[in-house]
Image: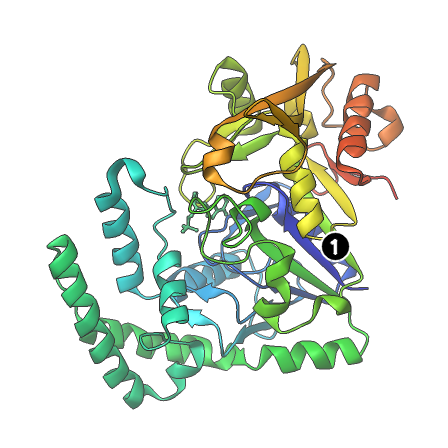
Amino acid sequence: MNSCITGLQWGDEGKGKVVDVLAEHSDIVVRYSGGANAGHTVVVGDSTFALHLLPSGSVRPNTICVIGNGVVVDPDILEMEIDKLAQRNITLTSRLLISENAHVVLDYHKKEDQLREDSLGQNKIGTTIRGIGPCYADKVGRSYAIRMADLRDIEKLKSQLRNIVEYKNKIFAALYNAEPISADQIFEKCKCYADKFLPFTTDTTEFLHKSIVDGKSILFEGAQGCLLDLDHGTFPFVTSSNASPLGMPAGCGVPSKMVDKFLGVAKAYTTRVGAGPFPTEQDNEIGQYIREQGGEYGTTTGRPRRCGWFDAVAVSYAVTIGAIDSIALMHLDTLAGLKEIKICRAYKINGKETTFFPANTTKLSQTECVYETLPGWEEDLTEVNDFSDLPLNARNYICQIEELTKKPVTIIGVGPKRNQTIFRQ
Ligand code: IMP
Protein backbone atom coordinates (compact mmCIF):
# COMPACT_ATOMS: atom_id res chain seq x y z
CA MET A 1 0.00 0.00 0.00
CA ASN A 2 1.51 3.32 -1.08
CA SER A 3 0.05 6.62 0.09
CA CYS A 4 0.70 10.25 -0.68
CA ILE A 5 0.15 12.77 2.09
CA THR A 6 -0.20 16.44 1.25
CA GLY A 7 -1.45 19.65 2.79
CA LEU A 8 -4.81 20.96 1.58
CA GLN A 9 -4.33 24.55 2.70
CA TRP A 10 -1.39 27.00 2.88
CA GLY A 11 0.93 24.61 4.72
CA ASP A 12 1.38 23.89 8.43
CA GLU A 13 -1.63 21.56 8.47
CA GLY A 14 0.05 18.94 10.64
CA LYS A 15 1.47 16.70 7.92
CA GLY A 16 4.48 15.82 10.08
CA LYS A 17 2.35 14.20 12.73
CA VAL A 18 0.20 12.32 10.22
CA VAL A 19 3.24 11.01 8.33
CA ASP A 20 4.92 9.96 11.58
CA VAL A 21 1.81 8.13 12.78
CA LEU A 22 1.27 6.34 9.46
CA ALA A 23 4.97 5.57 9.07
CA GLU A 24 4.52 2.90 11.72
CA HIS A 25 3.09 0.71 8.95
CA SER A 26 5.39 1.85 6.13
CA ASP A 27 8.84 0.80 5.05
CA ILE A 28 9.88 4.01 3.32
CA VAL A 29 9.01 7.72 3.60
CA VAL A 30 9.87 10.01 0.68
CA ARG A 31 9.98 13.81 0.65
CA TYR A 32 9.32 14.95 -2.90
CA SER A 33 9.24 18.75 -2.94
CA GLY A 34 10.25 21.94 -1.18
CA GLY A 35 13.26 22.35 1.03
CA ALA A 36 14.17 23.66 4.44
CA ASN A 37 11.29 26.15 4.19
CA ALA A 38 9.11 23.32 5.51
CA GLY A 39 8.68 22.77 9.21
CA HIS A 40 7.26 19.37 10.10
CA THR A 41 6.73 18.77 13.79
CA VAL A 42 6.73 15.30 15.27
CA VAL A 43 6.03 14.75 18.96
CA VAL A 44 7.05 11.49 20.57
CA GLY A 45 6.29 11.28 24.27
CA ASP A 46 7.88 14.37 25.80
CA SER A 47 10.22 15.01 22.86
CA THR A 48 9.43 17.38 20.04
CA PHE A 49 11.28 17.10 16.72
CA ALA A 50 11.14 19.95 14.21
CA LEU A 51 12.10 18.56 10.82
CA HIS A 52 12.78 20.72 7.79
CA LEU A 53 14.39 18.48 5.20
CA LEU A 54 14.34 15.00 6.62
CA PRO A 55 11.18 13.02 5.96
CA SER A 56 8.91 12.80 8.98
CA GLY A 57 9.54 9.06 9.15
CA SER A 58 13.05 9.85 10.45
CA VAL A 59 12.21 9.47 14.10
CA ARG A 60 11.12 5.87 13.59
CA PRO A 61 14.33 3.82 13.82
CA ASN A 62 13.57 1.34 11.03
CA THR A 63 12.04 3.62 8.43
CA ILE A 64 14.05 4.28 5.28
CA CYS A 65 14.07 7.98 4.48
CA VAL A 66 14.39 9.28 0.94
CA ILE A 67 14.95 12.85 -0.16
CA GLY A 68 13.72 12.90 -3.75
CA ASN A 69 15.01 14.80 -6.76
CA GLY A 70 12.27 17.44 -6.39
CA VAL A 71 13.64 18.64 -3.06
CA VAL A 72 16.16 21.48 -2.82
CA VAL A 73 18.70 20.42 -0.24
CA ASP A 74 20.39 22.87 2.10
CA PRO A 75 23.30 20.76 3.38
CA ASP A 76 23.92 23.05 6.40
CA ILE A 77 20.40 22.49 7.65
CA LEU A 78 20.40 18.82 6.78
CA GLU A 79 23.59 18.33 8.76
CA MET A 80 22.11 20.17 11.74
CA GLU A 81 18.99 18.02 11.60
CA ILE A 82 20.94 14.77 11.40
CA ASP A 83 23.15 15.87 14.33
CA LYS A 84 20.15 16.84 16.44
CA LEU A 85 18.60 13.43 15.91
CA ALA A 86 21.92 11.75 16.69
CA GLN A 87 22.03 13.63 20.01
CA ARG A 88 18.78 11.84 20.79
CA ASN A 89 20.24 8.50 19.72
CA ILE A 90 18.37 8.41 16.44
CA THR A 91 20.76 7.57 13.68
CA LEU A 92 20.17 7.76 9.95
CA THR A 93 23.48 6.35 8.74
CA SER A 94 22.09 3.22 7.15
CA ARG A 95 18.65 4.47 6.19
CA LEU A 96 18.95 7.87 4.49
CA LEU A 97 19.04 8.22 0.71
CA ILE A 98 19.40 11.53 -1.10
CA SER A 99 18.70 11.84 -4.80
CA GLU A 100 21.76 12.63 -6.86
CA ASN A 101 19.46 14.84 -8.94
CA ALA A 102 18.29 16.98 -6.02
CA HIS A 103 19.50 20.56 -6.32
CA VAL A 104 21.70 22.12 -3.66
CA VAL A 105 20.82 25.35 -1.83
CA LEU A 106 24.01 27.35 -1.34
CA ASP A 107 24.74 30.58 0.54
CA TYR A 108 24.21 32.78 -2.51
CA HIS A 109 20.63 31.48 -2.81
CA LYS A 110 19.81 32.57 0.71
CA LYS A 111 21.49 35.92 0.14
CA GLU A 112 19.52 36.43 -3.08
CA ASP A 113 16.25 35.49 -1.34
CA GLN A 114 16.92 38.04 1.41
CA LEU A 115 18.04 40.84 -0.94
CA ARG A 116 15.09 40.37 -3.25
CA GLU A 117 12.54 40.31 -0.44
CA ASP A 118 14.09 43.43 1.14
CA SER A 119 14.01 45.26 -2.17
CA LEU A 120 10.33 44.45 -2.77
CA GLY A 121 9.12 46.36 0.30
CA GLN A 122 5.31 46.24 0.44
CA ASN A 123 5.21 43.79 -2.46
CA LYS A 124 7.32 41.10 -0.87
CA ILE A 125 6.12 37.49 -0.84
CA GLY A 126 7.10 36.93 2.76
CA THR A 127 9.35 33.98 1.98
CA THR A 128 11.16 31.97 4.63
CA ILE A 129 14.52 33.37 3.32
CA ARG A 130 15.78 29.80 3.00
CA GLY A 131 16.92 30.36 -0.59
CA ILE A 132 14.14 28.20 -2.00
CA GLY A 133 12.97 30.43 -4.88
CA PRO A 134 16.49 31.29 -6.10
CA CYS A 135 17.56 27.63 -6.02
CA TYR A 136 14.53 26.46 -7.99
CA ALA A 137 15.09 29.38 -10.39
CA ASP A 138 18.63 28.14 -11.00
CA LYS A 139 17.26 24.63 -11.54
CA VAL A 140 14.89 25.86 -14.23
CA GLY A 141 17.59 28.12 -15.70
CA ARG A 142 20.01 25.12 -15.74
CA SER A 143 23.28 26.95 -16.49
CA TYR A 144 23.99 27.97 -12.88
CA ALA A 145 22.61 24.98 -11.01
CA ILE A 146 24.42 22.59 -8.67
CA ARG A 147 23.01 19.15 -7.95
CA MET A 148 24.04 16.61 -5.34
CA ALA A 149 25.79 14.58 -8.07
CA ASP A 150 28.04 17.58 -8.81
CA LEU A 151 29.69 17.09 -5.41
CA ARG A 152 31.31 13.95 -6.85
CA ASP A 153 33.66 15.82 -9.18
CA ILE A 154 35.20 18.36 -6.86
CA GLU A 155 37.64 19.87 -9.40
CA LYS A 156 34.87 20.48 -11.91
CA LEU A 157 32.72 21.87 -9.11
CA LYS A 158 35.43 24.40 -8.30
CA SER A 159 35.28 25.93 -11.76
CA GLN A 160 31.46 25.69 -11.87
CA LEU A 161 31.30 27.64 -8.62
CA ARG A 162 33.76 30.29 -9.86
CA ASN A 163 31.46 30.99 -12.84
CA ILE A 164 28.28 30.94 -10.82
CA VAL A 165 29.59 33.17 -8.06
CA GLU A 166 31.00 35.66 -10.57
CA TYR A 167 27.56 35.86 -12.15
CA LYS A 168 25.75 36.14 -8.81
CA ASN A 169 28.13 38.85 -7.59
CA LYS A 170 27.39 40.94 -10.67
CA ILE A 171 23.70 40.73 -9.86
CA PHE A 172 24.23 41.49 -6.18
CA ALA A 173 26.27 44.60 -7.02
CA ALA A 174 24.15 45.87 -9.91
CA LEU A 175 20.68 45.32 -8.45
CA TYR A 176 21.21 45.58 -4.73
CA ASN A 177 24.54 47.34 -4.24
CA ALA A 178 25.44 44.39 -2.03
CA GLU A 179 28.78 42.94 -0.93
CA PRO A 180 30.20 40.12 -3.09
CA ILE A 181 30.39 36.58 -1.81
CA SER A 182 33.47 34.39 -1.97
CA ALA A 183 33.55 31.43 -4.36
CA ASP A 184 36.42 29.91 -2.38
CA GLN A 185 34.42 29.91 0.84
CA ILE A 186 31.48 28.21 -0.84
CA PHE A 187 33.84 25.71 -2.44
CA GLU A 188 35.39 24.85 0.95
CA LYS A 189 31.90 24.25 2.33
CA CYS A 190 31.05 22.06 -0.66
CA LYS A 191 34.09 19.88 0.03
CA CYS A 192 32.68 19.22 3.52
CA TYR A 193 29.21 18.55 2.05
CA ALA A 194 30.77 16.01 -0.31
CA ASP A 195 32.46 14.15 2.57
CA LYS A 196 29.32 14.22 4.65
CA PHE A 197 26.58 13.52 2.12
CA LEU A 198 27.99 11.60 -0.84
CA PRO A 199 27.71 8.31 1.05
CA PHE A 200 23.93 8.90 1.11
CA THR A 201 23.63 10.18 -2.45
CA THR A 202 22.25 7.78 -5.02
CA ASP A 203 19.71 7.15 -7.77
CA THR A 204 16.62 7.28 -5.57
CA THR A 205 14.26 6.75 -8.52
CA GLU A 206 15.83 3.35 -9.17
CA PHE A 207 15.69 2.56 -5.46
CA LEU A 208 12.00 3.44 -5.22
CA HIS A 209 11.01 1.40 -8.26
CA LYS A 210 12.95 -1.61 -6.97
CA SER A 211 11.24 -1.19 -3.61
CA ILE A 212 7.84 -1.14 -5.27
CA VAL A 213 8.67 -4.36 -7.12
CA ASP A 214 9.75 -5.86 -3.77
CA GLY A 215 6.36 -5.02 -2.30
CA LYS A 216 7.57 -2.35 0.12
CA SER A 217 5.08 0.13 1.44
CA ILE A 218 5.88 3.77 0.71
CA LEU A 219 4.60 7.07 2.08
CA PHE A 220 5.13 10.09 -0.15
CA GLU A 221 5.31 13.20 2.00
CA GLY A 222 4.46 16.58 0.56
CA ALA A 223 5.71 19.85 1.96
CA GLN A 224 3.74 23.13 2.26
CA GLY A 225 0.20 22.81 0.89
CA CYS A 226 -1.84 22.76 -2.33
CA LEU A 227 -2.64 26.47 -2.11
CA LEU A 228 1.08 27.25 -2.10
CA ASP A 229 1.64 25.16 -5.25
CA LEU A 230 3.65 27.12 -7.81
CA ASP A 231 1.23 26.40 -10.66
CA HIS A 232 -2.07 25.82 -8.88
CA GLY A 233 -1.82 27.98 -5.78
CA THR A 234 -2.33 31.66 -5.09
CA PHE A 235 0.45 32.88 -7.38
CA PRO A 236 2.69 34.85 -6.83
CA PHE A 237 2.16 34.24 -3.10
CA VAL A 238 3.21 30.62 -3.36
CA THR A 239 6.34 28.58 -2.90
CA SER A 240 8.56 27.69 -5.86
CA SER A 241 7.65 24.02 -6.18
CA ASN A 242 4.58 21.92 -6.95
CA ALA A 243 3.49 21.41 -3.37
CA SER A 244 0.27 19.61 -4.32
CA PRO A 245 0.18 15.87 -5.13
CA LEU A 246 0.73 16.94 -8.75
CA GLY A 247 4.37 17.48 -7.79
CA MET A 248 4.81 13.96 -6.49
CA PRO A 249 5.59 12.05 -9.70
CA ALA A 250 8.06 14.66 -10.94
CA GLY A 251 9.56 15.09 -7.48
CA CYS A 252 10.56 11.46 -6.99
CA GLY A 253 10.15 9.67 -10.29
CA VAL A 254 7.23 7.47 -9.23
CA PRO A 255 4.03 7.90 -11.26
CA SER A 256 0.88 8.67 -9.29
CA LYS A 257 -0.65 5.51 -10.79
CA MET A 258 1.49 3.61 -8.28
CA VAL A 259 -0.07 5.39 -5.32
CA ASP A 260 -3.04 3.61 -3.78
CA LYS A 261 -4.31 6.41 -1.62
CA PHE A 262 -4.07 10.19 -1.55
CA LEU A 263 -4.63 11.56 1.92
CA GLY A 264 -5.10 15.30 2.32
CA VAL A 265 -4.26 17.00 5.60
CA ALA A 266 -6.23 20.06 6.68
CA LYS A 267 -6.52 21.97 9.91
CA ALA A 268 -9.95 22.35 11.47
CA TYR A 269 -9.46 26.07 10.68
CA THR A 270 -7.11 27.88 8.29
CA THR A 271 -3.71 29.48 8.73
CA ARG A 272 -1.29 31.20 6.44
CA VAL A 273 2.20 32.69 6.86
CA GLY A 274 3.59 35.34 4.59
CA ALA A 275 1.65 37.61 2.27
CA GLY A 276 -1.22 36.78 -0.07
CA PRO A 277 -4.99 36.51 -0.18
CA PHE A 278 -6.77 34.66 2.62
CA PRO A 279 -10.56 35.03 2.28
CA THR A 280 -11.54 33.56 5.67
CA GLU A 281 -8.85 35.40 7.66
CA GLN A 282 -9.96 36.65 11.05
CA ASP A 283 -7.65 39.56 11.82
CA ASN A 284 -9.45 40.06 15.14
CA GLU A 285 -9.95 38.46 18.54
CA ILE A 286 -11.14 35.18 16.95
CA GLY A 287 -7.92 34.89 14.95
CA GLN A 288 -5.95 35.80 18.06
CA TYR A 289 -7.79 33.12 20.07
CA ILE A 290 -7.03 30.45 17.48
CA ARG A 291 -3.38 31.56 17.26
CA GLU A 292 -2.84 31.30 21.00
CA GLN A 293 -4.84 28.09 21.51
CA GLY A 294 -3.20 26.40 18.54
CA GLY A 295 0.33 27.76 19.11
CA GLU A 296 0.21 29.15 15.60
CA TYR A 297 3.76 30.40 15.23
CA GLY A 298 6.01 29.24 12.37
CA THR A 299 8.20 26.18 12.97
CA THR A 300 10.81 27.50 10.54
CA THR A 301 10.69 31.26 11.07
CA GLY A 302 8.76 31.73 14.35
CA ARG A 303 6.44 34.22 12.59
CA PRO A 304 2.90 34.48 13.97
CA ARG A 305 0.56 32.74 11.55
CA ARG A 306 -2.51 34.49 10.16
CA CYS A 307 -5.59 32.57 11.34
CA GLY A 308 -9.15 32.20 10.08
CA TRP A 309 -12.16 29.94 9.64
CA PHE A 310 -12.17 26.67 7.73
CA ASP A 311 -12.53 27.41 4.04
CA ALA A 312 -14.43 24.56 2.36
CA VAL A 313 -14.12 26.25 -1.04
CA ALA A 314 -10.32 26.29 -0.83
CA VAL A 315 -10.08 22.77 0.62
CA SER A 316 -12.50 21.36 -1.99
CA TYR A 317 -10.29 22.84 -4.71
CA ALA A 318 -7.23 21.17 -3.17
CA VAL A 319 -9.17 17.90 -2.93
CA THR A 320 -10.05 18.18 -6.62
CA ILE A 321 -6.61 18.97 -8.00
CA GLY A 322 -5.00 16.41 -5.70
CA ALA A 323 -7.50 13.59 -6.39
CA ILE A 324 -7.74 13.29 -2.62
CA ASP A 325 -9.48 10.17 -1.27
CA SER A 326 -9.86 11.18 2.35
CA ILE A 327 -9.02 13.93 4.80
CA ALA A 328 -7.04 14.05 8.04
CA LEU A 329 -8.50 16.94 10.05
CA MET A 330 -5.98 18.24 12.54
CA HIS A 331 -6.08 20.59 15.53
CA LEU A 332 -9.76 20.00 16.23
CA ASP A 333 -9.00 20.50 19.95
CA THR A 334 -7.89 24.09 19.25
CA LEU A 335 -11.45 25.21 18.51
CA ALA A 336 -12.81 24.27 21.96
CA GLY A 337 -14.19 27.27 23.82
CA LEU A 338 -15.56 29.14 20.80
CA LYS A 339 -19.30 29.79 21.10
CA GLU A 340 -19.81 29.66 17.37
CA ILE A 341 -17.68 28.26 14.58
CA LYS A 342 -17.97 29.30 10.97
CA ILE A 343 -17.25 27.39 7.80
CA CYS A 344 -16.98 29.16 4.47
CA ARG A 345 -19.19 27.17 2.06
CA ALA A 346 -19.09 29.51 -0.96
CA TYR A 347 -17.52 32.70 -2.28
CA LYS A 348 -19.35 35.67 -3.66
CA ILE A 349 -17.34 37.38 -6.38
CA ASN A 350 -18.89 40.44 -8.05
CA GLY A 351 -22.27 39.42 -6.63
CA LYS A 352 -22.04 35.87 -8.07
CA GLU A 353 -21.85 32.86 -5.79
CA THR A 354 -19.30 30.15 -6.60
CA THR A 355 -17.98 27.06 -4.87
CA PHE A 356 -14.97 26.71 -7.18
CA PHE A 357 -11.82 28.33 -5.77
CA PRO A 358 -10.33 30.88 -8.16
CA ALA A 359 -6.57 30.49 -7.75
CA ASN A 360 -6.22 34.07 -8.84
CA THR A 361 -5.01 36.78 -6.52
CA THR A 362 -7.17 39.56 -7.97
CA LYS A 363 -10.38 37.53 -7.80
CA LEU A 364 -9.56 36.25 -4.33
CA SER A 365 -9.04 39.73 -3.00
CA GLN A 366 -12.57 40.63 -4.20
CA THR A 367 -14.10 37.61 -2.53
CA GLU A 368 -16.81 37.79 0.06
CA CYS A 369 -17.22 34.60 2.08
CA VAL A 370 -20.59 32.93 2.50
CA TYR A 371 -20.51 31.28 5.90
CA GLU A 372 -22.44 28.63 7.72
CA THR A 373 -22.45 29.11 11.45
CA LEU A 374 -22.37 26.11 13.73
CA PRO A 375 -22.52 25.92 17.51
CA GLY A 376 -19.14 25.37 19.18
CA TRP A 377 -18.24 23.21 22.17
CA GLU A 378 -16.59 23.83 25.53
CA GLU A 379 -15.17 20.38 26.19
CA ASP A 380 -11.45 19.65 26.08
CA LEU A 381 -10.89 17.09 23.30
CA THR A 382 -7.28 16.20 23.98
CA GLU A 383 -8.09 12.94 25.77
CA VAL A 384 -10.74 11.73 23.33
CA ASN A 385 -9.73 8.71 21.27
CA ASP A 386 -13.00 7.60 19.71
CA PHE A 387 -15.19 9.55 17.32
CA SER A 388 -18.32 8.68 19.24
CA ASP A 389 -16.86 10.27 22.38
CA LEU A 390 -16.51 13.68 20.74
CA PRO A 391 -19.11 16.28 21.76
CA LEU A 392 -22.12 16.31 19.43
CA ASN A 393 -21.25 19.77 18.11
CA ALA A 394 -17.72 18.66 17.24
CA ARG A 395 -19.09 15.63 15.40
CA ASN A 396 -21.57 17.84 13.55
CA TYR A 397 -18.74 20.18 12.61
CA ILE A 398 -16.79 17.29 11.07
CA CYS A 399 -19.88 15.99 9.24
CA GLN A 400 -20.43 19.46 7.80
CA ILE A 401 -16.86 19.52 6.50
CA GLU A 402 -17.40 16.10 4.94
CA GLU A 403 -20.59 17.26 3.29
CA LEU A 404 -19.00 20.37 1.84
CA THR A 405 -15.77 18.73 0.67
CA LYS A 406 -17.53 15.48 -0.35
CA LYS A 407 -14.72 13.47 1.23
CA PRO A 408 -14.61 11.41 4.41
CA VAL A 409 -12.63 12.66 7.37
CA THR A 410 -10.84 9.46 8.38
CA ILE A 411 -8.25 10.83 10.82
CA ILE A 412 -8.83 13.50 13.45
CA GLY A 413 -6.06 15.20 15.41
CA VAL A 414 -6.87 16.30 18.95
CA GLY A 415 -3.35 17.16 20.11
CA PRO A 416 0.27 16.95 18.99
CA LYS A 417 1.07 13.50 20.37
CA ARG A 418 0.80 10.24 18.47
CA ASN A 419 -1.93 8.91 20.72
CA GLN A 420 -3.99 12.09 20.33
CA THR A 421 -5.30 10.77 17.03
CA ILE A 422 -8.75 9.42 16.25
CA PHE A 423 -9.03 6.90 13.40
CA ARG A 424 -12.42 6.40 11.83
CA GLN A 425 -11.63 3.58 9.42
P1 IMP B 1 9.41 30.24 0.29
O1 IMP B 1 8.91 28.86 0.09
O2 IMP B 1 10.38 30.38 1.41
O3 IMP B 1 9.90 30.85 -0.98
O4 IMP B 1 8.15 31.14 0.72
C1 IMP B 1 7.05 31.39 -0.17
C2 IMP B 1 5.74 31.40 0.60
O5 IMP B 1 5.44 30.10 1.06
C3 IMP B 1 5.74 32.29 1.84
O6 IMP B 1 4.45 32.84 2.01
C4 IMP B 1 6.03 31.33 2.97
O7 IMP B 1 5.55 31.78 4.20
C5 IMP B 1 5.26 30.11 2.47
N1 IMP B 1 5.80 28.86 3.00
C6 IMP B 1 6.92 28.22 2.61
N2 IMP B 1 7.08 27.08 3.31
C7 IMP B 1 6.04 27.00 4.15
C8 IMP B 1 5.62 26.03 5.10
O8 IMP B 1 6.25 24.99 5.31
N3 IMP B 1 4.47 26.30 5.77
C9 IMP B 1 3.74 27.41 5.52
N4 IMP B 1 4.08 28.32 4.64
C10 IMP B 1 5.22 28.13 3.94
- Residue at point 71%, 66% (across, down): 256
Callout 1, which amino acid? Phe
Q: Position of residue 63 (x, y in %)?
A: 68, 65
Residue 387 visible somewhere in the drawing: yes
Q: Quadrant of the C terminus?
A: top right
Secondary structure under tag 1 reads strand
- Residue 26 location in percent, x, y? 75, 62
Display colour scheme: rainbow
Which quadrant is home to the N terminus?
Answer: bottom right
Q: Is label 1 within 8 A of ligand 1 (CB to nearest ligand atom)?
A: no
Q: What residue lies at 73% left-to-right and 53% top-to-bottom? A: 323
Q: In the image, is residue 156 above or below residue 18?
A: below
Whether residue 416 is visible here, answered yes or no, is no
Above or below, 171 against 331 in this view is: below
Q: Residue at x 24, y 85 (%)?
A: 159
Q: Is residue 419 above or below residue 83?
A: above
Q: Quadrant of residue 257?
A: bottom right
What residue would you read off at disc 1? 262
Q: Which residue sits at x=48%, y=15%? A: 284
* Front position in the image: 72 or 136: 136
The residue nearer to you, when weighing 380 against 183, is 183
Extreme-front residue of the structure: 351
Q: Is residue 52 above or below residue 396?
A: below
Whether residue 32 sits left or right of residue 339 in the image: it is left
The image shows residue 219 at horizontal and vertical percentages of 70, 61
**Viewer-proximal residue among 157 and 400:** 400
Q: Position of residue 56 (x, y in %)?
A: 61, 55
Horizontal side, residue 231 vs residue 315: left or right: left
